[in-house]
Amino acid sequence: MINKGDLRAKIKMLFEDITPEEKTLKSKNLFKNLDKFLQQLASQDSTIPEDFLIGVFAPMHDEAQWMFNHDEYSNLTAFPTVENGFMTFKKSAYGDLEESRDFGVVMKSPKKDAKTVNPHALVIPGRAFTKNGERLGRGKGYYDKYLASYSGKKIGLCFEEQILDEIPTEKHDINMDIIITDKNIYGELTP
């Protein structure tokens, strides 16, 4: 089996081969599938509270740019940040994010004074996933540490090309409940 570092390099090259036009089209299709799933989740899960929050991420240049129609979700979103070496989520609209180096790279993060929350569902990036929910992250372990005690719905987000037959996993790696791509939704919707 290929090692995680080699897989990350392979996915990085894959993203370099996608034209900006293709990336925009694929990202729009991915958002449609995510929106469809979230609407379905809201209609089928009677346990969703009125103050439902979705933990999301601000996409980096080498991730699906899924933030279309973010105004529609602005009151429902929380974004990750790092506090004392651990990832937390803070309630924030996409438009309120500011540049930071929270995860060791320049990215958009919530303001420091935003309220820390526990999202009811998480939309999680990954370098690659399997249809069974295995995830290959960037290698820092922030999501795995956070997910170790998280009980909400875990939704992996990627392009179809990032779906692999297998990914090397370790004991601390946490599987996703659902994987959403620009072409498919993998996993069952269960409240």
Image (cartoon, rainbow, N blue to C red):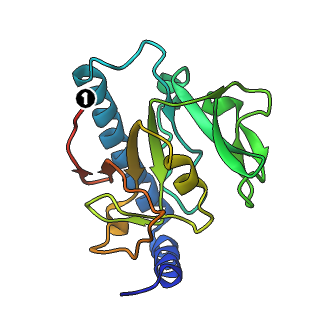
- Answer with the quarter of the image where residue 95 lies: top right
**Viewport quadrant of the C terminus:** top left
Q: Which residue is mark 1?
A: 40
User: Which residue appears at 32% of the width and 19% of the height?
Assistant: 47
Question: Considering only vertical position in the picture, is 65 above or below 21?
Answer: above
Residue 101 locus on image (x, y percent) = 78, 53
Residue 51 locus on image (x, y percent) = 48, 15
Question: Considering only vertical position in the picture, is 153 above or below 71?
Answer: below
Residue 153 locus on image (x, y percent) = 37, 38
User: Which residue appears at 52% of the width and 58% of the height?
Assistant: 63
User: Which residue appears at 54% of the width and 29% of the height?
Assistant: 77
User: Which residue appears at 55% of the width and 20% of the height?
Assistant: 75
Residue 123 locus on image (x, y percent) = 45, 43
Question: Considering only vertical position in the picture, is 16 above or below 41?
Answer: below
- Answer with the quarter of the image where residue 105 lies: bottom right
> Going by the image, does 175 lie left or right of 173?
left
- Please name whichever residue, 183 or 81, is drawn nearer the observer in this view of the structure: 81
- Please name whichever residue, 27 or 100, is drawn nearer the observer in this view of the structure: 100
- Outermost residue on the bottom side: it is 1
Label 1 secondary element: helix
Assess disc 1: are there few (<14), some (14-19) or many (≥20) residues with their C-alpha within 10 Å of its C-alpha: few
Q: Amino acid at mark 1?
A: Gln
> Going by the image, does 111 lie left or right of 142?
right
- Answer with the quarter of the image where residue 163 lies: bottom left
> Going by the image, does 110 lie left or right of 160?
right
